[in-house]
Image (cartoon, rainbow, N blue to C red):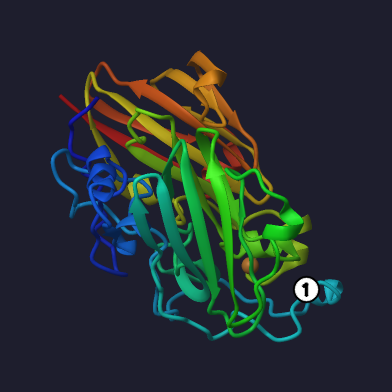
Amino acid sequence: MNTHRCTDTHARNKGRRTQLASAGKVGLRTQRSGVAALSAVALVTVLAGCGAAGSTSAPNAQAVGRATGGSANEVPMNGMGQAGNRANQMPSSMPGQGLNQTPRPMQVVRRGHDVSITMYTEETRVEIAPGVSFPAWTFDGTVPGPVIQLEQGDHVQLTLHNLDPHMSHSIDLHAALVAPNQNYVDVPPGGTRTITFDATVPGVFLYHCETQPMALHIAQGMYGAVVVTPKGQQPPQFTIVQSEFYKPLDLDDVENGTPQYVVFNGEANRYMLHPLHVRAGQTISVAFVDAGPNDWSAFHVVGSILREVEASGNPANRLTDVQTASVAPGDGILLTLRFPQPGTYTFTTHSMRDAAKGAMGSFVVTP
Ligand SMILES: [Cu+2]
């Protein structure tokens, strides 16, 4: 496997100092060696990062979905006007406006294959484009929420605390084989619920809030990636989540309009401004999830051909030499690629409308 350092830096990282441990095998080994409580900050920050070989932290990795002060150039709020068309589905209060809860990071405790995860739902403003603040509903204060990094065979106990004072939330994990009516149920404000499941199937999965109106809860930012690494394999070096942002709190716009932004890991053009750095000749692996809520991704890397694409991130579903990978909303892939020549390579969705709205990034390939 590769031993390169991930050098994904983000000069405008306003939210918190970043540490990173969980994306690399080193981090997993460290956790298994004892009752190592993996810093939630670490998991919150792994989305497009990778653990530096031989270390459990990579200070250059970036935070995702940074919380913002909520002052500059906010996306226009339509309030509940249009959403009032769907008043029967809307929360009774006026959520999300003015609330900027302090992000409370995920906590993970691993004992061998027994993994205990604590997550929080809250309303926190995040920056979705340079200078654009969005009143998000979140898992753990970021959009996307933190990567849930598992290994095939893990026994998972996930406890969700709903810190949102206004409305119920929930969590639906595509990696789990459980009865949704017993597990993906609403957690009321201030409430707590625990879900247990076995990560039997390897893959790259979505998790999201299941509370109705689900389209709005997803559009407001309630999603993230679950990566279940096959036994004996390394986790991917990068995790990228594509999603769309519509007018805040506007279910009608989510269902009938077009997105204002389409983003990778929560912010328009994030990796155009702050590229991912890799080495020529290295094989790199990327977990890619399309959180939607509506648009397919046509993931493409200009100047490259994806060497392998595993549908749903499962090695049993492997294609080779794919020019553009189709990823449905609610699905994920694991892809590998290698750049023989140094240079700058754009990655994007080849759905041009969405690329123009911010779903673009770049790999800077050095000799
Ligand atoms: Cu929710």
Q: Residue at x 29, y 62 (%)?
A: 39
Q: Residues within 10 Å of mark 1 (few under 14, many from 20)?
A: some
Residue 9 location, x and y as percent? 23, 51
Ligand 1 found in image quarter: bottom right
Q: Name the spot of residue 31 as percent of width and height, x first.
A: 27, 50
Q: Residue 282 or 341: which is nearer the viewer?
A: 282
Closer to the camera, 164 or 32? 32
Q: Secondary structure at mark 1?
A: helix
Query: Residue 257, percent across and down?
Result: 74, 57
| Above or below: residue 120 compared with residue 70 | above
Residue on which the image places disc 1:
83
Residue 311 in sight here: yes
Specify the quadrant that holds the N terminus. Answer: top left
Quadrant of the rendered image containing residue 29:
top left
**Left or right: 90, with 145 as reference point:** right
Nearest the viewer among 327 and 107 is: 107
Q: Is residue 244 left or right of residue 39?
A: right
- Amino acid at circle 1: Ala
The x and y percentages for residue 304 are 39, 20
Q: What residue is rendered at 63% in x and 76% in y?
A: 77
**Compared with residue 82, is residue 295 higher up or lower down, i.e. above or below?**
above
Q: Split into 4 quadrants, where in the image is the C terminus?
A: top left
Vertical side of 158 occupied by 76: above or below? below
Above or below 171: residue 15: below
User: Could you tell me which residue is drawn at 56 percent across and 62 percent down?
Assistant: 221
Q: Going 46% across and 36% down the picture, which residue do you hit?
A: 152
